[in-house]
Amino acid sequence: MPEIDFNALDLSELKKLEKDVAKAISSFEQRRKAEALAALEERAKEFGFSLSELTGLASEKTRTPAVAKYRHPENPALTWSGRGRKPQWIIDALSAGKSLGDLAI
């Protein structure tokens, strides 16, 4: 590796160098973690298990989308499952005197 004369660099060059070094360190650590994980997965397979079975950590679970329970009266493409924040069209309908029952599918 070539020697770098840090005293000959100006502030912007030093900051860029610092940023590049931090990025290189992070990339190196990520590669090492991936290699370690692959090695552990392979070792667990040799014993007939997955790594998640041995560690008790569940693999990534995907949630199915909730079924829509309410539909916009004028635009049927707008729906809401009743979970999470109320969409603006629900808020507007409720303030106009409608009930959730009026918007139910």
Image: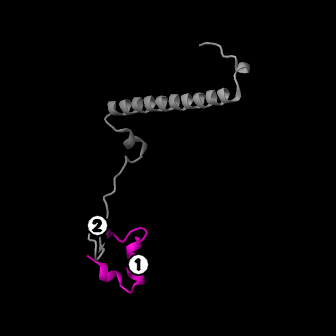
Where disc 1 sits, the SS reads helix
The residue drawn where x is 30% and y is 79% is 103
Quadrant placement of the C terminus? bottom left
Q: Which of 85 and 65 is in front in this view?
A: 85
Q: Where is residue 1 in the image (x, y as percent from the top left)?
A: 59, 13
1 left or right of 38? Answer: right
57 left or right of 104? Answer: right
Residue 26: quadrant of the picture: top right
Instruction: Specify the farthest residue to the bottom.
Output: 97
The residue drawn where x is 33% and y is 38% is 49
Q: Where is residue 101 in the image (x, y as percent from the top left)?
A: 31, 82
The residue drawn where x is 67% and y is 27% is 14
Q: Which mark is residue 35?
A: none
Instruction: Establish if 74 lies above or below 1.
Output: below
As for residue 95 lying within the magenta part, the answer is yes
The amino acid on which the numbered mark 2 sits, given as a three-letter code, is Val
The amino acid on which the numbered mark 1 sits, given as a three-letter code, is Asp
Where disc 2 sits, the SS reads loop
The residue drawn where x is 43% and y is 69% is 85
Q: What stretch is highlighted in magenta?
A: 79-105
Per the image, the residue denoted by label 2 is: 67
Residue 83: quadrant of the picture: bottom left
Residue 67: quadrant of the picture: bottom left
Instruction: Specify the farthest residue to the top.
Output: 2
Q: Where is residue 81 in the image (x, y as percent from the top left)?
A: 33, 69
Per the image, the residue denoted by label 1 is: 92
48 left or right of 13? Answer: left
Q: Nearer the viewer, residue 37 or 101?
A: 101
Between marks 2 and 1, how big is the CA–CA gap?
22 Å
